[in-house]
Image (cartoon, helix red, strand yellow):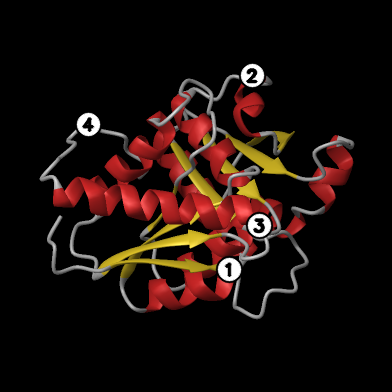
Amino acid sequence: MERSKPIIVTSDASGAQQAARQGFLVMIVDVIDMSTTLESALEAGAAAVLGASPDETRAPVKVDPERMGRYAAQIARSHQTDIILISEPRVGSDQERRQRCQKVIKGIEAEGGILAAVLPNLGAETPRMLDMQGKVVVAVTDTGGVAYDAAFQESPRVITGTVARTYRHRGLEPALRAVARARQEWGDCNGLAVVAASRNSMEDVLAAQFIANLMLKQDDRGISNETDYGNRP
């Protein structure tokens, strides 16, 4: 990573949108639980992970969950696999979760995608509910999903990160994996924007700051990490 490229911390869907518009690689941090769930899905073997807005959102930004559904179906088709949706409420019926995802589901069906299941947004516990190996996983959530969707409308260079315990990792490891993925995806982006999914969530704000500081400290020490923690389809 070049030192001349900035690393910034911002928040909310509007911050994610603006950073993507400026050519930054955008990392969505929604510790409880969207980004933790998606990181866990990757560790459980998911082929790709995405975020999307639910049908209704009050965020003052452009989102397009139907487009996210179509994109997920296109990735799934290229991998000859199915799609798993992650939705809310955490405690509730599958029907309640599906009801909030109708636009994403419409996009999936329009592209001929196959929806395998709709699971609750439970972080490290979600992959224990169903085998995610090789699947495309889409988190349709109010904060992290909306922020991801908003950024994606400007640029596909969107990833996730967390500091919480995940499906296979704990302690500092999830944050180190987030840093490693950012380095891998850096490419020709103008910088890295670590986005706390909600400025009202102290967990997200502190986690985003921690990941950004960890990245800066590694640069100061000349540390590199070439491990493949890929998130791209």
| Residue sitting at x 49%, y 42% | 162
Asked if the residues shown at circle 3 and circle 4 are in contact, with their CB atoms under 8 angstroms apart, the answer is no
Q: Is residue 9 above or below residue 135?
A: below
Mark positioned earlier in the residue sequence (1 or 2): 1
Q: Which mark is residue 12?
A: 1
Residue 84 appears in the picture as rendered: yes
Q: Is residue 45 above or below residue 217?
A: above
Instruction: Give the residue type at disc 2.
Output: Arg
Mark 3 Cα shell of 10 Å, populated few (<14), some (14-19), many (≥20): some
Mark positioned earlier in the residue sequence (1 or 3): 1
| CA gap, disc 4 and disc 1 | 29 Å
Q: Nearer the viewer, mark 4 or mark 2?
A: 4
Q: Quadrant of residue 192?
A: bottom left
Left or right, residue 33 beside residue 215:
right
Q: Which residue is mark 4?
A: 227
Mark positioned earlier in the residue sequence (3 or 4): 3
Q: Which residue is mark 2?
A: 128
Asked if the residues shown at circle 1 and circle 2 are in contact, with their CB atoms under 8 angstroms apart, the answer is no
Nearer to the camera, 152 or 175: 175
Q: Which mark is residue 201?
A: 3
Mark 2, secondary structure of its residue: helix
Mark 3, secondary structure of its residue: loop
Q: Quadrant of residue 80?
A: top left
Residue 81 appears in the picture as rendered: no
Nearer to the camera, 179 or 47: 179
Instruction: Give the residue type at disc 4.
Output: Thr
